[in-house]
Protein backbone atom coordinates (compact mmCIF):
# COMPACT_ATOMS: atom_id res chain seq x y z
CA UNK A 1 0.00 0.00 0.00
CA UNK A 2 2.86 2.35 0.92
CA UNK A 3 4.61 1.58 -2.34
CA UNK A 4 1.41 2.42 -4.27
CA UNK A 5 1.10 5.76 -2.42
CA UNK A 6 4.71 6.63 -3.18
CA UNK A 7 4.19 5.73 -6.82
CA UNK A 8 1.06 7.91 -7.01
CA UNK A 9 2.88 10.79 -5.35
CA UNK A 10 5.74 10.45 -7.80
CA UNK A 11 3.36 10.48 -10.78
CA UNK A 12 1.57 13.56 -9.42
CA UNK A 13 4.90 15.34 -8.93
CA UNK A 14 5.89 14.44 -12.47
CA UNK A 15 2.58 15.80 -13.83
CA UNK A 16 3.00 18.99 -11.78
CA UNK A 17 6.48 19.53 -13.17
CA UNK A 18 5.20 18.90 -16.69
CA UNK A 19 2.35 21.37 -16.17
CA UNK A 20 4.81 23.97 -14.96
CA UNK A 21 6.92 23.43 -18.05
CA UNK A 22 3.90 23.87 -20.31
CA UNK A 23 2.44 26.88 -18.56
CA UNK A 24 5.72 28.72 -18.00
CA UNK A 25 8.16 27.60 -20.73
CA UNK A 26 10.59 30.37 -20.02
CA UNK A 27 10.36 30.31 -16.23
CA UNK A 28 8.52 32.82 -14.12
CA UNK A 29 7.20 35.78 -16.06
CA UNK A 30 7.27 39.13 -14.35
CA UNK A 31 4.19 41.29 -14.45
CA UNK A 32 5.25 43.99 -16.86
CA UNK A 33 1.78 45.43 -17.43
CA UNK A 34 1.91 49.18 -17.74
CA UNK A 35 -0.97 51.48 -17.06
CA UNK A 36 -2.40 52.55 -20.41
CA UNK A 37 -4.70 55.53 -21.06
CA UNK A 38 -8.35 54.48 -20.95
CA UNK A 39 -9.74 53.73 -24.43
CA UNK A 40 -13.07 55.34 -25.33
CA UNK A 41 -15.83 53.90 -27.51
CA UNK A 42 -19.20 55.36 -28.45
CA UNK A 43 -21.83 53.14 -30.03
CA UNK A 44 -24.00 55.22 -32.39
CA UNK A 45 -27.31 53.51 -33.13
CA UNK A 46 -29.79 54.34 -35.86
CA UNK A 47 -33.29 54.37 -34.29
CA UNK A 48 -35.11 55.68 -37.37
CA UNK A 49 -38.48 54.33 -38.46
CA UNK A 50 -36.98 51.83 -40.89
CA UNK A 51 -35.58 49.85 -37.93
CA UNK A 52 -39.08 48.39 -37.55
CA UNK A 53 -38.48 46.14 -40.58
CA UNK A 54 -38.73 42.44 -39.68
CA UNK A 55 -35.97 40.95 -41.82
CA UNK A 56 -33.27 39.80 -39.38
CA UNK A 57 -33.86 36.18 -38.35
CA UNK A 58 -37.63 36.75 -38.23
CA UNK A 59 -37.42 39.74 -35.89
CA UNK A 60 -37.07 43.49 -36.27
CA UNK A 61 -33.79 45.23 -36.88
CA UNK A 62 -34.32 47.10 -33.62
CA UNK A 63 -34.68 43.85 -31.67
CA UNK A 64 -31.45 42.54 -33.18
CA UNK A 65 -29.64 45.76 -32.24
CA UNK A 66 -30.93 45.62 -28.65
CA UNK A 67 -29.84 42.00 -28.26
CA UNK A 68 -26.40 42.83 -29.65
CA UNK A 69 -26.03 45.79 -27.30
CA UNK A 70 -26.95 43.72 -24.25
CA UNK A 71 -24.41 41.02 -25.14
CA UNK A 72 -21.71 43.58 -25.86
CA UNK A 73 -22.37 45.46 -22.62
CA UNK A 74 -21.92 42.21 -20.68
CA UNK A 75 -18.57 41.53 -22.37
CA UNK A 76 -17.08 45.06 -22.48
CA UNK A 77 -13.57 45.08 -20.91
CA UNK A 78 -13.38 46.95 -17.61
CA UNK A 79 -10.77 49.37 -18.92
CA UNK A 80 -12.96 50.60 -21.80
CA UNK A 81 -14.98 53.78 -21.26
CA UNK A 82 -18.16 53.28 -23.28
CA UNK A 83 -21.03 55.54 -24.29
CA UNK A 84 -24.16 55.25 -26.44
CA UNK A 85 -25.60 57.85 -28.80
CA UNK A 86 -28.78 57.59 -30.85
CA UNK A 87 -29.98 59.16 -34.08
CA UNK A 88 -33.64 59.38 -35.04
CA UNK A 89 -34.87 58.20 -31.63
CA UNK A 90 -37.02 61.10 -30.42
CA UNK A 91 -38.76 63.12 -33.16
CA UNK A 92 -41.62 61.31 -34.99
CA UNK A 93 -42.79 64.23 -37.12
CA UNK A 94 -42.25 65.29 -40.74
CA UNK A 95 -40.36 68.54 -40.25
CA UNK A 96 -37.00 67.89 -41.86
CA UNK A 97 -35.14 70.66 -40.03
CA UNK A 98 -36.23 69.29 -36.67
CA UNK A 99 -35.70 65.66 -37.68
CA UNK A 100 -32.12 66.38 -38.74
CA UNK A 101 -31.29 67.60 -35.24
CA UNK A 102 -32.56 64.40 -33.65
CA UNK A 103 -29.44 62.95 -32.06
CA UNK A 104 -28.91 62.49 -28.34
CA UNK A 105 -26.47 60.84 -25.98
CA UNK A 106 -28.31 57.93 -24.40
CA UNK A 107 -25.47 56.95 -22.05
CA UNK A 108 -22.40 59.16 -21.36
CA UNK A 109 -18.89 58.01 -22.25
CA UNK A 110 -17.23 56.82 -19.06
CA UNK A 111 -16.90 53.86 -16.70
CA UNK A 112 -19.64 51.40 -17.58
CA UNK A 113 -22.60 50.68 -15.34
CA UNK A 114 -24.06 47.74 -17.21
CA UNK A 115 -27.47 47.88 -15.55
CA UNK A 116 -27.99 51.58 -16.31
CA UNK A 117 -26.80 51.17 -19.91
CA UNK A 118 -29.09 48.18 -20.54
CA UNK A 119 -32.05 50.00 -19.02
CA UNK A 120 -31.44 52.96 -21.34
CA UNK A 121 -31.23 50.71 -24.42
CA UNK A 122 -34.46 48.90 -23.46
CA UNK A 123 -36.44 52.15 -23.78
CA UNK A 124 -35.58 52.67 -27.47
CA UNK A 125 -38.25 52.38 -30.17
CA UNK A 126 -37.90 53.09 -33.94
CA UNK A 127 -39.07 56.67 -34.47
CA UNK A 128 -37.79 59.21 -36.96
CA UNK A 129 -35.15 60.44 -39.39
CA UNK A 130 -31.58 59.30 -40.14
CA UNK A 131 -29.22 62.22 -39.33
CA UNK A 132 -25.93 60.31 -39.61
CA UNK A 133 -23.76 63.37 -40.28
CA UNK A 134 -24.96 65.37 -37.24
CA UNK A 135 -24.68 62.26 -35.04
CA UNK A 136 -21.04 61.69 -36.05
CA UNK A 137 -20.14 65.31 -35.29
CA UNK A 138 -21.70 65.04 -31.83
CA UNK A 139 -20.08 61.66 -31.21
CA UNK A 140 -16.64 63.09 -31.99
CA UNK A 141 -17.30 65.78 -29.37
CA UNK A 142 -18.40 63.11 -26.87
CA UNK A 143 -15.01 61.39 -27.20
CA UNK A 144 -12.82 64.44 -26.70
CA UNK A 145 -10.14 64.43 -24.04
CA UNK A 146 -7.67 61.81 -22.88
CA UNK A 147 -4.78 60.06 -24.60
CA UNK A 148 -6.36 56.64 -25.17
CA UNK A 149 -7.76 55.26 -28.40
CA UNK A 150 -11.10 56.63 -29.57
CA UNK A 151 -13.59 54.71 -31.66
CA UNK A 152 -17.09 55.32 -33.02
CA UNK A 153 -19.11 52.24 -33.97
CA UNK A 154 -22.01 53.31 -36.20
CA UNK A 155 -24.90 50.88 -36.75
CA UNK A 156 -27.43 51.94 -39.39
CA UNK A 157 -29.89 50.41 -41.84
CA UNK A 158 -30.20 53.26 -44.31
CA UNK A 159 -28.73 56.32 -45.94
CA UNK A 160 -28.46 59.67 -44.24
CA UNK A 161 -31.68 61.68 -44.81
CA UNK A 162 -30.18 65.05 -43.90
CA UNK A 163 -28.19 66.05 -46.99
CA UNK A 164 -26.45 68.30 -47.96
CA UNK A 165 -24.50 67.54 -44.77
CA UNK A 166 -22.72 64.59 -46.39
CA UNK A 167 -21.65 62.07 -43.70
CA UNK A 168 -18.63 61.10 -45.82
CA UNK A 169 -17.47 64.72 -45.72
CA UNK A 170 -18.13 64.77 -41.98
CA UNK A 171 -15.93 61.68 -41.55
CA UNK A 172 -13.17 63.28 -43.63
CA UNK A 173 -13.45 66.41 -41.51
CA UNK A 174 -13.06 64.34 -38.35
CA UNK A 175 -10.06 62.52 -39.83
CA UNK A 176 -8.52 65.84 -40.89
CA UNK A 177 -8.48 67.07 -37.30
CA UNK A 178 -5.77 64.52 -36.55
CA UNK A 179 -7.36 63.39 -33.29
CA UNK A 180 -6.82 59.70 -33.98
CA UNK A 181 -10.50 58.80 -34.03
CA UNK A 182 -11.63 55.73 -36.00
CA UNK A 183 -15.16 55.19 -37.29
CA UNK A 184 -16.31 51.62 -37.93
CA UNK A 185 -19.66 51.10 -39.64
CA UNK A 186 -22.14 48.24 -39.78
CA UNK A 187 -24.99 48.08 -42.27
CA UNK A 188 -28.12 46.15 -41.31
CA UNK A 189 -29.46 44.38 -44.41
CA UNK A 190 -28.04 47.22 -46.53
CA UNK A 191 -28.90 48.15 -50.09
CA UNK A 192 -26.19 49.32 -52.51
CA UNK A 193 -26.50 53.03 -51.64
CA UNK A 194 -26.35 52.41 -47.90
CA UNK A 195 -23.36 50.12 -48.34
CA UNK A 196 -21.49 52.71 -50.41
CA UNK A 197 -22.15 55.48 -47.90
CA UNK A 198 -21.17 53.47 -44.84
CA UNK A 199 -18.04 52.19 -46.61
CA UNK A 200 -17.09 55.75 -47.48
CA UNK A 201 -17.47 56.85 -43.84
CA UNK A 202 -15.27 54.01 -42.60
CA UNK A 203 -12.61 54.49 -45.28
CA UNK A 204 -12.25 58.18 -44.40
CA UNK A 205 -10.92 57.36 -40.92
CA UNK A 206 -9.20 54.02 -41.55
CA UNK A 207 -12.10 52.07 -40.08
CA UNK A 208 -13.93 48.99 -41.33
CA UNK A 209 -17.34 48.39 -42.87
CA UNK A 210 -19.34 45.20 -42.25
CA UNK A 211 -22.61 44.10 -43.84
CA UNK A 212 -24.88 42.34 -41.33
CA UNK A 213 -27.71 39.92 -42.13
CA UNK A 214 -28.06 37.99 -38.85
CA UNK A 215 -28.24 38.73 -35.12
CA UNK A 216 -25.18 36.74 -34.15
CA UNK A 217 -23.11 38.55 -36.78
CA UNK A 218 -24.08 41.89 -35.29
CA UNK A 219 -23.26 40.85 -31.71
CA UNK A 220 -19.93 39.29 -32.70
CA UNK A 221 -18.78 42.21 -34.81
CA UNK A 222 -19.70 44.97 -32.35
CA UNK A 223 -17.99 42.98 -29.60
CA UNK A 224 -14.83 42.65 -31.70
CA UNK A 225 -14.71 46.38 -32.35
CA UNK A 226 -15.18 47.26 -28.68
CA UNK A 227 -12.42 44.80 -27.72
CA UNK A 228 -10.16 46.23 -30.41
CA UNK A 229 -10.33 49.64 -28.73
CA UNK A 230 -8.48 48.16 -25.75
CA UNK A 231 -5.59 46.89 -27.91
CA UNK A 232 -2.28 48.79 -27.86
CA UNK A 233 -2.18 51.60 -30.40
CA UNK A 234 -0.07 50.85 -33.47
CA UNK A 235 0.00 53.44 -36.22
CA UNK A 236 0.12 51.75 -39.64
CA UNK A 237 2.45 53.08 -42.32
CA UNK A 238 1.35 53.30 -45.94
CA UNK A 239 3.48 51.17 -48.28
CA UNK A 240 3.15 50.49 -51.99
CA UNK A 241 4.17 46.98 -52.96
CA UNK A 242 5.85 46.34 -56.30
CA UNK A 243 5.08 43.87 -59.08
CA UNK A 244 8.48 42.19 -58.63
CA UNK A 245 10.71 41.46 -55.69
CA UNK A 246 13.78 43.31 -56.98
CA UNK A 247 11.70 46.50 -57.18
CA UNK A 248 9.91 46.02 -53.84
CA UNK A 249 10.22 48.44 -50.92
CA UNK A 250 12.39 47.34 -47.98
CA UNK A 251 10.42 47.05 -44.74
CA UNK A 252 11.47 47.04 -41.10
CA UNK A 253 9.43 45.64 -38.21
CA UNK A 254 6.06 47.40 -38.14
CA UNK A 255 2.48 47.55 -39.45
CA UNK A 256 1.90 48.53 -43.09
CA UNK A 257 -1.17 49.21 -45.24
CA UNK A 258 -1.64 48.85 -48.98
CA UNK A 259 -4.34 48.07 -51.58
CA UNK A 260 -4.39 45.14 -53.98
CA UNK A 261 -6.80 44.10 -56.72
CA UNK A 262 -7.70 40.47 -57.25
CA UNK A 263 -5.15 38.73 -59.44
CA UNK A 264 -2.41 41.23 -58.63
CA UNK A 265 0.78 40.53 -56.73
CA UNK A 266 2.30 42.76 -54.09
CA UNK A 267 5.99 42.28 -53.27
CA UNK A 268 7.94 43.57 -50.25
CA UNK A 269 11.50 42.94 -49.01
CA UNK A 270 12.77 42.26 -45.49
CA UNK A 271 16.39 41.76 -44.36
CA UNK A 272 16.89 38.87 -41.92
CA UNK A 273 20.26 38.40 -40.22
CA UNK A 274 21.61 35.00 -39.16
CA UNK A 275 20.10 34.02 -35.83
CA UNK A 276 16.96 36.12 -36.38
CA UNK A 277 13.40 35.02 -37.11
CA UNK A 278 11.00 36.69 -39.53
CA UNK A 279 7.36 36.66 -38.50
CA UNK A 280 4.87 38.09 -40.98
CA UNK A 281 1.10 38.15 -41.30
CA UNK A 282 -1.34 39.70 -43.72
CA UNK A 283 -5.06 40.54 -43.52
CA UNK A 284 -7.17 41.43 -46.56
CA UNK A 285 -10.56 43.09 -45.99
CA UNK A 286 -13.53 42.84 -48.32
CA UNK A 287 -14.79 46.41 -48.11
CA UNK A 288 -17.35 45.78 -50.87
CA UNK A 289 -19.64 43.00 -52.08
CA UNK A 290 -17.55 40.04 -53.24
CA UNK A 291 -18.20 36.66 -54.79
CA UNK A 292 -18.04 33.55 -52.55
CA UNK A 293 -14.92 31.39 -52.48
CA UNK A 294 -11.87 33.49 -51.72
CA UNK A 295 -8.42 33.13 -50.26
CA UNK A 296 -5.18 34.88 -49.38
CA UNK A 297 -1.61 33.67 -49.86
CA UNK A 298 1.57 34.95 -48.18
CA UNK A 299 4.89 33.56 -49.45
CA UNK A 300 8.46 34.06 -48.27
CA UNK A 301 10.80 33.67 -51.25
CA UNK A 302 14.54 34.08 -51.83
CA UNK A 303 15.82 36.69 -54.25
CA UNK A 304 16.40 33.84 -56.72
CA UNK A 305 12.76 32.79 -56.57
CA UNK A 306 12.97 29.73 -54.32
CA UNK A 307 10.04 29.46 -51.95
CA UNK A 308 11.06 29.27 -48.27
CA UNK A 309 7.72 29.02 -46.49
CA UNK A 310 4.12 30.02 -47.09
CA UNK A 311 0.92 30.78 -45.23
CA UNK A 312 -2.52 30.55 -46.80
CA UNK A 313 -6.18 30.75 -45.83
CA UNK A 314 -9.46 30.30 -47.67
CA UNK A 315 -13.12 30.93 -47.00
CA UNK A 316 -16.58 30.63 -48.44
CA UNK A 317 -19.36 32.82 -47.09
CA UNK A 318 -19.68 36.09 -45.21
CA UNK A 319 -16.63 37.70 -43.63
CA UNK A 320 -15.04 41.11 -43.40
CA UNK A 321 -11.41 39.96 -43.45
CA UNK A 322 -9.24 36.91 -43.99
CA UNK A 323 -5.75 36.50 -42.56
CA UNK A 324 -2.72 34.25 -42.69
CA UNK A 325 0.88 34.32 -41.50
CA UNK A 326 4.28 32.64 -41.60
CA UNK A 327 7.53 32.28 -39.63
CA UNK A 328 11.05 31.89 -41.00
CA UNK A 329 13.96 31.31 -38.59
CA UNK A 330 17.29 32.16 -40.23
CA UNK A 331 20.00 29.72 -39.10
CA UNK A 332 22.66 31.28 -36.89
CA UNK A 333 26.29 31.74 -37.80
CA UNK A 334 29.55 31.90 -35.84
CA UNK A 335 30.62 34.75 -38.09
CA UNK A 336 29.31 38.00 -36.61
CA UNK A 337 29.94 39.74 -39.90
CA UNK A 338 27.77 37.32 -41.91
CA UNK A 339 25.48 39.32 -44.22
CA UNK A 340 21.72 39.49 -43.82
CA UNK A 341 19.50 37.55 -46.19
CA UNK A 342 16.94 39.52 -48.20
CA UNK A 343 13.61 37.73 -48.00
CA UNK A 344 10.85 38.61 -50.47
CA UNK A 345 7.26 38.61 -49.22
CA UNK A 346 4.59 38.05 -51.85
CA UNK A 347 0.91 38.77 -51.13
CA UNK A 348 -1.92 37.62 -53.40
CA UNK A 349 -5.64 37.21 -52.81
CA UNK A 350 -8.64 35.88 -54.73
CA UNK A 351 -11.42 38.21 -53.58
CA UNK A 352 -13.51 38.98 -56.66
CA UNK A 353 -15.84 41.99 -56.64
CA UNK A 354 -19.45 41.22 -57.50
CA UNK A 355 -20.88 42.31 -60.84
CA UNK A 356 -21.25 46.06 -61.11
CA UNK A 357 -19.02 46.77 -58.08
CA UNK A 358 -15.93 48.95 -58.50
CA UNK A 359 -12.63 47.11 -58.38
CA UNK A 360 -10.45 50.18 -57.80
CA UNK A 361 -8.85 50.92 -55.50
CA UNK A 362 -8.05 47.32 -54.64
CA UNK A 363 -8.97 45.56 -51.43
CA UNK A 364 -7.28 47.08 -48.36
CA UNK A 365 -4.59 44.92 -46.81
CA UNK A 366 -2.56 45.13 -43.60
CA UNK A 367 0.90 43.57 -43.47
CA UNK A 368 2.63 43.00 -40.14
CA UNK A 369 6.38 42.42 -40.16
CA UNK A 370 8.36 41.44 -37.07
CA UNK A 371 12.07 40.53 -37.12
CA UNK A 372 13.18 39.16 -33.74
CA UNK A 373 16.09 37.24 -32.28
CA UNK A 374 15.53 33.59 -33.13
CA UNK A 375 15.16 30.93 -30.41
CA UNK A 376 18.29 29.13 -29.28
CA UNK A 377 18.54 25.37 -29.65
CA UNK A 378 17.87 24.96 -25.93
CA UNK A 379 14.57 26.75 -26.21
CA UNK A 380 13.35 25.60 -29.60
CA UNK A 381 10.76 23.37 -27.97
CA UNK A 382 9.79 26.08 -25.47
CA UNK A 383 8.90 28.41 -28.30
CA UNK A 384 6.04 26.08 -29.14
CA UNK A 385 4.72 26.11 -25.56
CA UNK A 386 6.08 22.79 -24.20
CA UNK A 387 9.09 24.18 -22.35
CA UNK A 388 11.68 21.88 -20.81
CA UNK A 389 8.87 19.55 -19.73
CA UNK A 390 9.05 17.95 -23.18
CA UNK A 391 11.42 15.18 -22.08
CA UNK A 392 9.22 14.52 -19.05
CA UNK A 393 6.24 14.12 -21.35
CA UNK A 394 8.21 11.65 -23.48
CA UNK A 395 9.29 9.69 -20.42
CA UNK A 396 5.74 9.61 -19.08
CA UNK A 397 4.32 8.36 -22.38
CA UNK A 398 7.02 5.69 -22.69
CA UNK A 399 6.55 4.55 -19.10
CA UNK A 400 2.80 4.28 -19.58
CA UNK A 401 3.26 2.28 -22.78
CA UNK A 402 5.69 -0.19 -21.17
CA UNK A 403 3.53 -0.50 -18.05
CA UNK A 404 0.50 -1.26 -20.24
CA UNK A 405 2.35 -4.02 -22.06
CA UNK A 406 3.60 -5.57 -18.82
CA UNK A 407 0.16 -5.42 -17.21
CA UNK A 408 -1.44 -7.04 -20.25
CA UNK A 409 1.17 -9.82 -20.29
CA UNK A 410 0.81 -10.41 -16.54
CA UNK A 411 -2.99 -10.55 -16.79
CA UNK A 412 -2.85 -13.10 -19.60
CA UNK A 413 -0.32 -15.20 -17.62
CA UNK A 414 -2.52 -15.17 -14.50
CA UNK A 415 -5.58 -16.21 -16.55
CA UNK A 416 -3.60 -19.02 -18.15
CA UNK A 417 -2.37 -20.28 -14.72
CA UNK A 418 -5.92 -20.09 -13.30
CA UNK A 419 -7.30 -22.18 -16.18
CA UNK A 420 -4.61 -24.87 -15.82
CA UNK A 421 -5.44 -25.21 -12.15
Image (tube, rainbow, N blue to C red):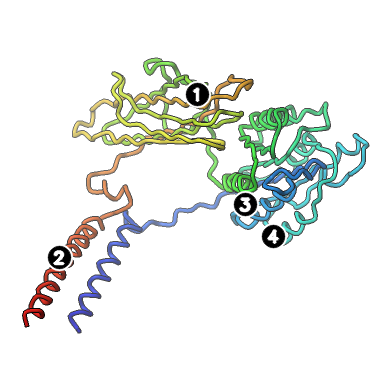
Q: Position of residue 197 (x, y in %)?
A: 71, 29
Judge from the rendering whether residue 264 lies leftward or rightward of residue 377; answer left or right: right
The numbered dot on residue 113 is: 4
Q: Quadrant of residue 175?
A: top right
Q: Could you give the CA–CA distance between mark 1 and mark 4, rounded to whole angstroms?
A: 42 Å
Q: Secondary structure at mark 2?
A: helix
Q: Secondary structure at mark 4?
A: loop
Q: Where is mark 3, residue-wise?
A: 80
Marks 1 and 3, the one that precedes in the sequence? 3
Marks 1 and 2, the one that precedes in the sequence? 1
The numbered dot on residue 239 is: 1
Marks 1 and 4, the one that precedes in the sequence? 4
User: Marks 1 and 2: CB-CB under 8 Å?
Assistant: no
Q: Position of residue 418 (x, y in %)?
A: 10, 80
Judge from the rendering whether residue 206 lies leftward or rightward of residue 87; answer left or right: left
Q: Could you give the CA–CA distance between mark 3 and mark 2, rounded to whole angstroms?
A: 57 Å
Amino acid sequence: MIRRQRLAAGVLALLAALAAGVAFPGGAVADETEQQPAPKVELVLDVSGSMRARDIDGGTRMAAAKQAFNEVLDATPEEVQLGIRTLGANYPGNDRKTGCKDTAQLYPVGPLNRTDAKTAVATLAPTGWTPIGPALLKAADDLQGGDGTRRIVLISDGEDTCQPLDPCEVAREIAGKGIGLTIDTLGLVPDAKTRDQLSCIADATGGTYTSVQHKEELSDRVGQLVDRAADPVVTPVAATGADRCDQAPSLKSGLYTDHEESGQQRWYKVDVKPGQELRASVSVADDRTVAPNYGVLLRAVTMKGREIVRGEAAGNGRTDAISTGLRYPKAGSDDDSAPAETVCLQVTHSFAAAAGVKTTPGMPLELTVDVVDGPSQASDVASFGLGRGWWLLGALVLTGFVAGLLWGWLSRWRVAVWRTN
